[in-house]
Image: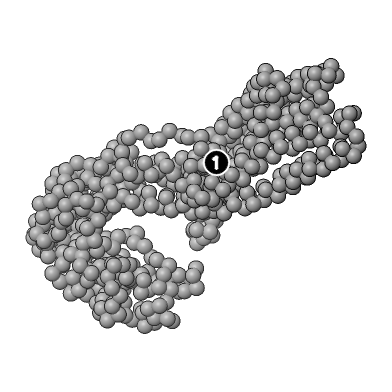
Amino acid sequence: MSPPTSRLSPRRAPVLVLGHAAATARPGAAALLALMVLIASAIPAGLAIGSGALVGLIADPGRASDAVVVSAAPIVVIIGSLFLLQQVLPAPASAGAEDLGRRMGRIVADRMLTALGRPTAAEHLDHPRTARLVTDINSGLGGSGIRDALVGMVNIGILRGGAISGALIIITYRWWVALALFLAYGYAVLIMSRGFQRMLHSSEGVPDRVRRALYLKDLVPGAAKEVRIFGLADWLLGGYRGEWRQAIEGLRDERRGAWRVGLTGGAAVLAAQVLMFGMLAADLWNGEVSVGQATTLAIGATALHGLNTVTPDLVSIAMAGAVLNQVDRLERWTAGFAGGQGGRPVRFARTIVFEEVGFRYPDSDAWVLRGLNLTLPAGTSTAIVGINGTGKTTLVKLMCGLYTPTEGRILIDGVDLAEADLVLWQRQCAALFQDWVRWGLTIRENVLLGAPAQPDDQEELQRTADLCGLTEVVEALPDGWSTVLSREFGGVDLSGGQWQRVGLCRALWALRAGAGLLVLDEPTAALDVRGESELYNLLLQAAQGKSIVLISHRFSTVRYADQIVVLEDGRVLESGDHQSLLAAQGRYAEMFHVQADRFGEVEATS
């Protein structure tokens, strides 16, 4: 399937994105938070008006002192209450923003995982764009990014709201003075916003550029044996430092220019404020405004500083908005891939047919498979062999509906897999891939996750363990079936061969739950030759009447399959049983004899 080509949503303003996300996450809490911001924003105007009234009252020569005291008392109480509210209100507002921000962070993580897990096919996970989006989102979710951004938005909202309330007071004085102040502050905000946008642009590019640096850093503990044996620590450290230095160079340049932005904006604001206070002083001198009015206007004008306040919160808001935009883009991107539900129900009872199937990975011109024609009869075992890179694993992933053919089609009993209900079809596939998951859970859960909807029947579980030789492993564990298979969580770890039996038991549990197709991609790679032979015999017994597709490089295993398929150059080169392929003296016979001779040499020298 080709990647979706629909246009992704345009980037929205970070404040709008955060506000919408907050309202969606918890509408009641977001509304209460907005109300607290609104009240806090009105306080500067209230203080300005109250202070002007108090000064005007005291400065009135026509009032007796007793009358001034009586009239001033309620004003003082109001001013004190407003001042107290101004000091107290930000604390609960910030606490509410922190709580809501934590919830938003959890929701964003959930949205990302849902977007990645929603498509039934897995091809979107291999696309470079998916990797970039996930890296960007994880970079922003690190630490407490969204929480800090919401707290910052509340703080800046209070400052900007107070500035607007102060500006409304200035309008009552002279509208054009208010306009001049707005233009000056608007210019300062504009150039600062552009500066932060440039910083954000540099920051958005950082995840792409630092991916290699972080990769090199993680290799120091992650590849501990190789690092020490080959003396790679200094090389990795030097590479990490060099990559990191190059990655943040552009961001550093933007930050160096921040002081110039602040100086230019500050000059514009200073000029406007000098105009404002100069005219106000002249009008006060000429008696055109009273002392009380001048006080109100002066305090209102000082509140405008909130418009161009520069804090790290601006960067936090911008980064969090970018993360939310990226989550939205990820959801739209993955929505374009196959959903899988609602198609035709299929059940493998007769054949699986590949008709002229071709496949290539996203952003690649190289064909992994091309012109592949193959028939897999139900109830038989098929082994797929070939040198590395011939598309063996890709073939079984296509068959399981994890990838969609770029061309051609796959028919399950005559039904095109592209039209089938992939969810139901995948429940019929019991697969054990090369990179199967070793869950950090109990050994019981590691097996039962092969069919999580299947009831946990201990007797049935024990019989399944007996079939794949897992019983001895379980009996040797300290807590039996309840032993956690992870040292990280206080449990134990298993050897490669023991883990292989756990994985096979998981696949067999899926068969017992109703799956009809067993897919094994190098199932015995961690076992010796004797263990491989024993385990394969057990599998044949356990999967009687089921269909088996086996990928293996060991011909001692594949020789017992009903059908052996040799892949080369992305298509079927030969097919048949072991004896017929040997008799044909083709590629299979060549590979078989090479491997047989190698084992013969080993036996002769041992």
Between 427 and 551, the residue placed more toward the observer is 427
Residue depicted at x 10% and y 52%? 414
Q: In the drawing, does residue 335 fall left or right of residue 185?
A: left
Residue type pointed to by label 1: Met
Residue 466 in sight here: no
Quadrant occupied by the N terminus: top left
Between 413 and 588, the residue placed more toward the observer is 413
Q: Where is residue 419 in the image (x, y as percent from the top left)?
A: 18, 48
Res. 271 image quadrant: top right
Disc count in the image?
A: 1
Residue bearing mark 1: 319
- Coloring scheme used: one colour
Residue depicted at x 31% and y 47%? 123
Residue depicted at x 59% and y 33%? 196
Quadrant occupied by the C terminus: bottom left
Q: Where is residue 366 in the image (x, y as percent from the top left)?
A: 28, 40
Residue depicted at x 19% and y 63%? 517
119 up-or-down from 432: above or below:
above
Residue 193 in sight here: yes
Q: In the drawing, does residue 130 fall left or right of residue 414?
A: right
602 up-or-down from 320: above or below:
below
Res. 532 image quadrant: bottom left
